[in-house]
């Protein structure tokens, strides 16, 4: 093991530190965020900063970096203006297109057109979802704050709808994400499939951990 | 595909909905949080709600559920009182012990003692790390707020040190987490290894996505 202290971390070249710090807390979910502006111009961007906030009501959080001077954050603008967005799982065969959505396309160019991905719409929900995605979620903006610590934006979304193959959902509500081949991201650019894994029963003190068959 | 709208989600039995909503945004990093109280009593708990907030300074966020009436949140209390905590990766062979740390042990019982995991300490850093963990991080509390939307706690930690095998870190700072067999969690209780995956180059408009050899 090598120990990197605060001084060593601060002294790293910027891009090296960015890669290291984005990798070091572990794998993150790869999700395509679909949004649209008031004119219906669609936008799609890959994010790996979505996290669980609550199940009842169903709330998810997402971190959006602030726009450096002279740049634009189309996804953030669209979510704040339209009040809704979609989250779309990325399967292994979608990773190349999903990563390409991170390129800086101009405002009037949809990443749906620039990639091979297809925009779908639900009635009365203006944000597009990704038709090819194995699992899609629609959310409305529930809270927004800019974190004073580094100016990143915290977006909290209320889950309004879930589109998921019923075959992936088990009797107790858990979802078999190996069936959708949902990808995880390491750092900024590395996409990975996940193996079958092992499920454990509810843990109790001084009771041996039990494995749930499936 | 089956569409579940807000009404269908609201009508689900509580545990079914909890499982579904915890699974549906995708896999999350499995991390053991080490902490200690003022008397040096150690605590260890599995979390899957850690996310990236910034690389410079290196900041990570974590969501902690509020304590229902009559229960305790030892990790949260320890972090708020001591101002520091550790994040420890979980390898495949550690999943049983990691999951067992979620059992409700009394305040005076350390999950390190209750499981097979070993507490280690760095000088001048009172929160214990997990010796068996392939990657360990030490953080100081940088910000805390209780989100008004559902009373969950947002903890923001500043990365003070990283303990990681140098062999996992590549020339550009990315970390090969397949080498540490770092686990992801689906929902509340399912642990998974991750496959080698594919890394893409920096995406540019109208330039084909490139694959980085490694």
Image (cartoon, coloured by chain):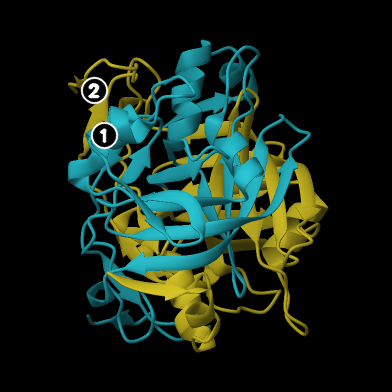
Chain colours: A yellow, B cyan
Which label number is shown at residue A209? 2
Rendered-image quadrant of the C terminus of chain A: top left
Measuring from the top left, give residue B138's x and y in whole percent.
Answer: 48, 59
Place residue B188 in its image quadrant. Answer: top left
Q: Nearer the viewer, residue B97 or B203?
A: B97
Q: Give the chain of mark 2.
A: A
Residue A118 shows in this picture:
no
Q: Residue at x 37, y 72 (%)?
A: A3
Is residue B142 among what the camera can see?
Answer: yes
Q: Nearer the viewer, residue B50 or A197?
A: B50
Image spot of residue A72 (x, y percent): 73, 75
Asked whether disc 1 touches disc 2, contact meaning CB atoms under 8 Å apart, the reply is yes
Please give left or right for residue B16 compared with residue B156 in the image: left
Closer-to-camera residue (A51/B98)? B98
In the rendered view, would you say A17 is above or below A73?
below
Mark 1–mark 2 Cα distance, whole angstroms, equals 8 Å
- Are both tags, 1 and 2, on one chain? no
Which element is circle 2 on?
A: loop
Question: Circle 1 — which element?
Answer: helix
Q: Is residue A111 left or right of residue A69?
A: left
Q: In the picture provided, is B62 more to the left or to the right than A100?
A: right
Q: Position of residue A162 (x, y in %)?
A: 53, 33
State which chain disc 1 sits on: B
Q: Residue at x 44, y 64 (%)?
A: A98
Query: What is the number of the mark on residue B97?
Result: 1
Residue lying at 66% horizontally and 49% vertically, measured from the top left: A127
């Amino acid at each position: 093991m090598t120990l990197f202290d605060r001084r060593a971390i601060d002294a790293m070249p910027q891009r090296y530190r960015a890669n290291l710090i984005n990798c070091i807390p572990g794998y993150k979910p790869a999700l395509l965020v679909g949004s649209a502006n008031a004119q219906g111009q669609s936008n799609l961007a890959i994010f790996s900063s979505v996290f669980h906030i609550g199940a009842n009501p169903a709330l998810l959080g997402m971190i959006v970096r602030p726009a450096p001077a002279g740049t634009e954050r189309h996804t953030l603008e669209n979510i704040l203006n339209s009040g809704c967005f979609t989250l779309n799982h990325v399967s292994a065969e979608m990773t190349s297109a999903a990563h390409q959505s991170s390129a800086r396309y101009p405002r009037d160019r949809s990443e749906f057109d620039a990639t091979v991905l297809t925009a779908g719409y639900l009635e009365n929900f203006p944000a597009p979802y990704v038709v090819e995605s194995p699992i899609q979620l629609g959310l409305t903006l529930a809270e927004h704050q800019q974190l004073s610590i580094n100016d990143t934006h915290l977006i909290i979304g209320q889950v309004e709808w879930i589109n998921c193959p019923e075959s992936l959902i088990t009797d107790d509500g858990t979802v078999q994400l190996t069936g959708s081949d949902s990808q995880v991201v390491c750092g900024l650019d590395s996409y990975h499939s996940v193996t079958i894994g092992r499920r454990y029963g509810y843990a109790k003190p001084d009771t041996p951990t039990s494995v749930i068959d499936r």
